[in-house]
């Protein structure tokens, strides 16, 4: 059995088209998730240069058709996420099925590459395909009810490979179907990204006076903070192996450094109920008194958890 999700990628706030494309592809091709790049397959593109190849076809499309969308409205690429039941298949078979899904879904008219990730208990693949066709004369149109068509195609391929499928999926709301985590049940623990987003919202709701105060609040909440080149900020909490970078392409809209700074400096308001505030086992996350915690941290010094 596999569940699917179709994701549309636009340019990220504060980034160029090339940066936005590269960020997404770097995440998908992470060698720690793909066994050093072994679990990657491609059609009509080289995964290492796919971002440049996708952009080149977009430029050819403009030259051939004379049509061009506004930069913030243009679709950079599409991503299909396909997740399988733990134990029903392995990463290699998931990659094969994902490639088959990508080929049938695009009808071989769009370049794409597939990555199979091994960082979760359940095998799952990511399919990235160019919005511009191979002949550079048209673009993929996200038609009405495309998510349903994608799921039906995935179910058919699963049956062909001897896997189970969801015969009568229950609507989530307004004809939307539940993702894999919801099918597992309400006891599924939140991911590190979900916990990070919830803690960010808690700290921002306390109205820190500066970015420095916000980062100190995150440290007080138990997060390590790492600042890298070009003001890149990453977080890691107890039990997490790798840092999670603070950027919209990783955490979602509204979670980029520029967004956080806008909230702090009063240029934007924090949407209510933006993320579910839960702890590792579903318990509420700790709310902080920023005045006490920040002053205590400043008296104690930054310490080893705060890396400059």
Image: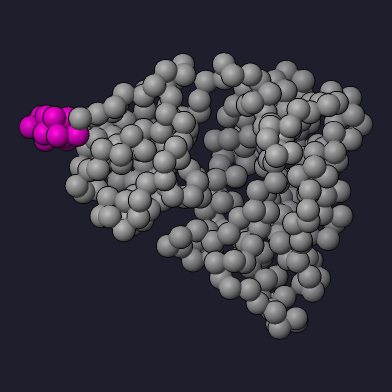
Image check: 52 left or right of 169?
Answer: left
Magenta highlight: main SS: helix
> In the rendering, at what x and y percent does residue 52 appear?
61, 65
Which quadrant does the C terminus fall into?
A: top left
Query: Is the residue 239 above or below the residue 154 in the image?
Result: above
Res 296 visible: yes
Q: Residue furthest left?
A: 299
**Where on the picture, by quarter, is residue 22?**
bottom right
Query: Is the residue 102 above or below the residue 157 in the image?
Result: below
Q: Nearer the viewer, residue 261 or 79?
A: 261
> In the rendering, at what x and y percent does residue 37 appear?
63, 41
For image coordinates 74% across by 32% down, the residue present is 171
Res 257 visible: no
Image check: 65 left or right of 51?
Answer: right
Q: Nearer the viewer, residue 243 or 12?
A: 12
Q: Nearer the viewer, residue 43 or 287?
A: 287
Image check: 176 left or right of 203?
Answer: right
For image coordinates 50% across by 58% down, the residue present is 12
Segment tinted magenta in the rendering: 290-302
For image coordinates 41% across by 41% down, the residue present is 272
């Amino acid at each position: 059995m596999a569940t699917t999700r179709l994701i549309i990628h636009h340019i990220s706030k504060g980034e160029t088209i090339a940066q936005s494309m590269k960020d997404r592809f770097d995440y998908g091709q992470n060698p720690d998730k793909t066994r050093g790049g072994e679990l990657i397959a491609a059609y009509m593109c080289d995964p290492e240069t796919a971002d440049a190849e996708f952009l080149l076809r977009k430029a050819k499309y403009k030259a051939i058709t004379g049509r061009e969308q506004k930069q913030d409205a243009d679709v950079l690429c599409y991503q299909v996420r396909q997740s399988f039941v733990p134990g029903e298949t392995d990463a290699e078979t998931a990659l094969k099925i994902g490639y088959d899904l990508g080929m049938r879904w695009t009808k071989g008219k769009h370049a794409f590459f597939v990555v199979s990730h091994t960082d979760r208990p359940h095998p799952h693949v990511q399919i990235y395909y160019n919005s511009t066709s191979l002949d550079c004369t048209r673009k993929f149109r996200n038609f009405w009810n495309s998510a349903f068509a994608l799921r039906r195609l995935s179910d058919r391929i699963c049956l062909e490979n001897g896997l189970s499928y969801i015969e009568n999926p229950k609507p989530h709301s307004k004809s939307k179907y539940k993702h894999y985590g919801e099918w597992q049940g309400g006891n599924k623990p939140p991911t590190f990204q979900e916990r990070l987003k919830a803690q960010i919202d808690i700290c921002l709701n306390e109205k820190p006076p500066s970015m420095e105060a916000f980062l100190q609040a995150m440290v007080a909440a138990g997060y390590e903070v790492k600042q890298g080149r070009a003001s890149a900020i990453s977080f890691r909490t107890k039990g997490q192996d790798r840092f999670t970078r603070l950027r919209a392409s990783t955490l979602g809209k509204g979670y980029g450094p520029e967004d956080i700074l806008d909230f702090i400096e009063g240029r934007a308001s924090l949407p209510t109920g933006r993320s579910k505030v839960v702890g590792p086992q579903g318990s509420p996350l700790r709310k902080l008194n920023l005045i006490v915690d920040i002053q205590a941290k400043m008296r104690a010094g930054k310490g080893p958890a705060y890396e400059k």
